[in-house]
Amino acid sequence: MNRQTLSNHDIDYYHEKGFLVVRDVFARSEIQALATDVERVVSERSDTFRHSNMRVRFKTSGVDQVLEVIDPISDLSPVAKSFCHDSRITDRVGSVYGEAASLFKDKYFCKPAGTEGLALHQDWIAWPGFPESFLTVLVAIDQFSEASGATKVYPGCHKAGYLSPRDSMHHHLEHSQMAVSPECLELAPGDIALFSCYTPHYSEANRSHGTRRGYFISYNAFSEGENRWQSHYNEFHEWIRSCVPEETRSQLVFI
């Protein structure tokens, strides 16, 4: 099988801008298979997807609370897991690194019509040993557009590194901190976008009439550790527990 590497031009563009869009990586049939298997997971586990489950997060849509994130999903969906290890992704990420890519985490995002967006932030967080090479590949399941609340990035701002206090907490940024205008990652189903952990990004509300779903798969360079997926989630769950009152920590589960 031919390796799906990036051209030197694309690699240079990624390092200069902090992101890269690649068109038509997956066929519509493959994207539909991913969507169908995620729907199966949601249907089968609807009784366990609740606020006390550290695997999921919810968002406001109108007056309702809707399931927004399943983090992770690759251990529940064989199709999602196959995407994580698909050479059409890993070869391209390896091109950026100049070495093999190792899976770090994955999460499914669903933004129904009317759902609010995400505040401006960077993905890197100042935990001991958190990989500096961390990058994310966004696989578009639905259309990502201005109307549907597509991810927006600030090009080139990744070069400034981490812009928040190194206190092990997650921070939001202010748009006034950015010296350039944002770019919208407009994607069709089957397109992918790569962006650095230091690339400031955000999304606005979904003002379209349809749902905007995406699969976000993150990697680190092999030289920063192999098979860190499980250790990351162990650390992530400890961090979640540390952020809630001690008397309620025992109520949190991961199922």
Image: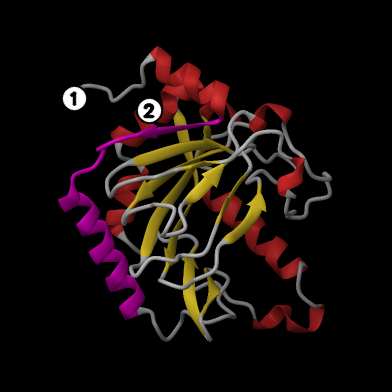
Q: Residues within 10 Å of mark 2 (few under 14, many from 20)?
A: many
Q: Nearer the viewer, residue 232 or 143?
A: 143
What residue is shown with label 2? 92
Q: Position of residue 118 (x, y in %)?
A: 59, 60
User: Which residue has dot 1 on it?
Assistant: 1
- Tell whether position 29 is magenta: yes
Q: Secondary structure at mark 1?
A: loop
The image quarter containing residue 203 is: bottom right
Query: Residue at coordinates 84% horizontally, 49% vertically from top-left?
Result: 167
Locate residue 160: give its quadrant. top right
Q: Amino acid at mark 2?
A: Arg
Q: Is residue 22 left or right of residue 169?
A: left
Q: Does the stretch in magenta take in 250?
A: no
Q: Secondary structure at mark 2?
A: helix
Range covered by the magenta-colored residues: 18-44
| Position in image of residue 163 (x %, y %) | 77, 40
Relative depth, front residue between 189 and 176: 176
Horizontal side, residue 170 vs residue 148: left or right: right
Taking the view exactly as shown, the residue that stands out farthest to the top is 8
